[in-house]
């Protein structure tokens, strides 16, 4: 599939900011089934993008813009060729030990309710358990973009029974880790099957490690294993490790942020 992505984030400050510093995890890597054809980051301020690679193998870009800044726009535009992999992830940069992906974080700490949900899906085969978990999470949580925010924990999302893709991913990851299945958070983009192209944000899903198979992707928000309609951008233990944008500003005490994401896909000829 040929996928085109345009992702714009706009900031407006109530008072001009003296300085803005951001780290972007918005650039996908090549791996089996995903081949970046073109990718560009544009900042509408006079600043320099510094590229690094974090400990998870994500491509990061950091910039510092000096004000006064009343408005700031970060625009991503790119195209990616993908192939169907049925959720199996291969050819990625792996440098961290698997036990790391069993670690709980502030957003992915299992409480009694999550452990109960996980036990219902437990079995000798971790792949079967992961599929069962994906279905269980989808049944336990309804999608509601107003119900949670980026600080919502997996336990809070399950208790509320509502959340967004980030919450589905966090709950799935937390439950998997409670079954001693290594799991990680993934951020990226995907082509909606209903033909919708404009979105208010990117997408999030999860990956679990299955012996003799490797990392396998699961999208509990859509009850599917990600394939050719997905663009995988960044991974981490939770949202904070793979967040598309994180930053701080000096001055500009309050900021208003708006995000627009356009993702289109077409089958290769």
Image (cartoon, rainbow, N blue to C red):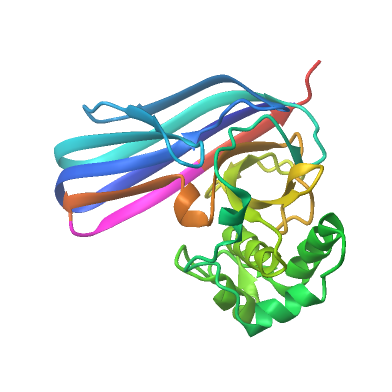
Q: Foreground residue, 180 or 65? A: 180
Q: Position of residue 174 (x, y in %)?
A: 63, 67
Q: Residue furthest bottom?
A: 112
Q: Foreground residue, 5 or 248? A: 248
Q: Residue at x 77, y 61 (%)?
A: 134
Q: Quadrant of residue 190?
A: top right
* In this rendering, position of residue 39 left or right of residue 17: right
Q: Measured along the vertical axis of the image, is residue 161 above or below residue 188?
A: below
Q: Measured along the vertical axis of the image, is residue 26 above or below residue 185?
A: above
* In this rendering, position of residue 167 left or right of residue 217: left
Q: Residue at x 58, y 76 (%)?
A: 155
Q: Measured along the vertical axis of the image, is residue 198 above or below residue 113?
A: above
Q: Residue at x 52, y 71 (%)?
A: 153
Quarter that holds the C terminus: top right
Magenta stretch, main secondary structure class: strand
Q: Position of residue 9 (x, y in %)?
A: 40, 42
Q: How many marks?
A: 0
Q: Measured along the vertical axis of the image, is residue 206 above or below residue 155?
A: above
Q: Foreground residue, 180 or 19? A: 180
Q: Residue furthest top?
A: 269
Residue 49 falls within the magenta-colored stretch: no
Q: Position of residue 237 (x, y in %)?
A: 54, 55
What is the span of residues highlighted in magenta in the rendered image? 253-260
* In this rendering, position of residue 262 left or right of residue 266: left
Quarter that holds the N terminus: top right
Q: Quadrant of residue 193?
A: top right
Q: Residue at x 47, y 51 (%)?
A: 241
Q: Position of residue 162 (x, y in %)?
A: 63, 73
């Amino acid at each position: 599939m040929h996928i085109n992505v345009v992702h714009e984030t706009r900031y407006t400050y109530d008072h001009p900011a003296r300085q803005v510093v951001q780290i972007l995890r918005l650039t996908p890597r090549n791996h089996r089934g995903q081949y970046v054809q073109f990718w560009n980051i544009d900042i509408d301020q006079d600043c320099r993008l510094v590229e690094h690679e974090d400990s998870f193998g994500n491509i990061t870009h950091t910039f510092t813009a000096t004000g006064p800044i009343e408005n700031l726009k970060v625009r991503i535009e790119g195209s990616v060729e993908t192939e169907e992999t049925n959720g199996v992830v291969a050819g990625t940069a792996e440098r961290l030990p698997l036990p790391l992906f069993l670690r709980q974080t502030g957003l992915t700490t299992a409480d009694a309710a999550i452990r109960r949900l996980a036990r219902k899906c437990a079995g000798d085969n971790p792949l079967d358990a992961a599929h069962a978990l994906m279905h269980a999470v989808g049944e336990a949580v309804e999608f509601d973009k107003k119900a949670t925010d980026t600080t919502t924990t997996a336990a809070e999302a399950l208790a509320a029974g509502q959340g967004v893709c980030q919450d589905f991913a966090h709950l799935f990851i937390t439950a998997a880790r409670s079954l001693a299945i290594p799991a990680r958070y993934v951020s990226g983009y995907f082509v909606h099957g209903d033909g919708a192209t404009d979105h208010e944000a990117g997408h999030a899903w999860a990956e679990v490690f299955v012996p003799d198979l490797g990392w396998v992707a699961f999208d509990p928000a859509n009850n599917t294993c990600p394939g050719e309609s997905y663009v995988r951008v960044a991974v981490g233990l939770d949202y904070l490790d793979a967040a598309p944008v994180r930053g701080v500003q000096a001055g500009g005490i309050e900021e208003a942020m708006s995000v627009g994401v356009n993702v289109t896909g077409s089958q290769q000829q």
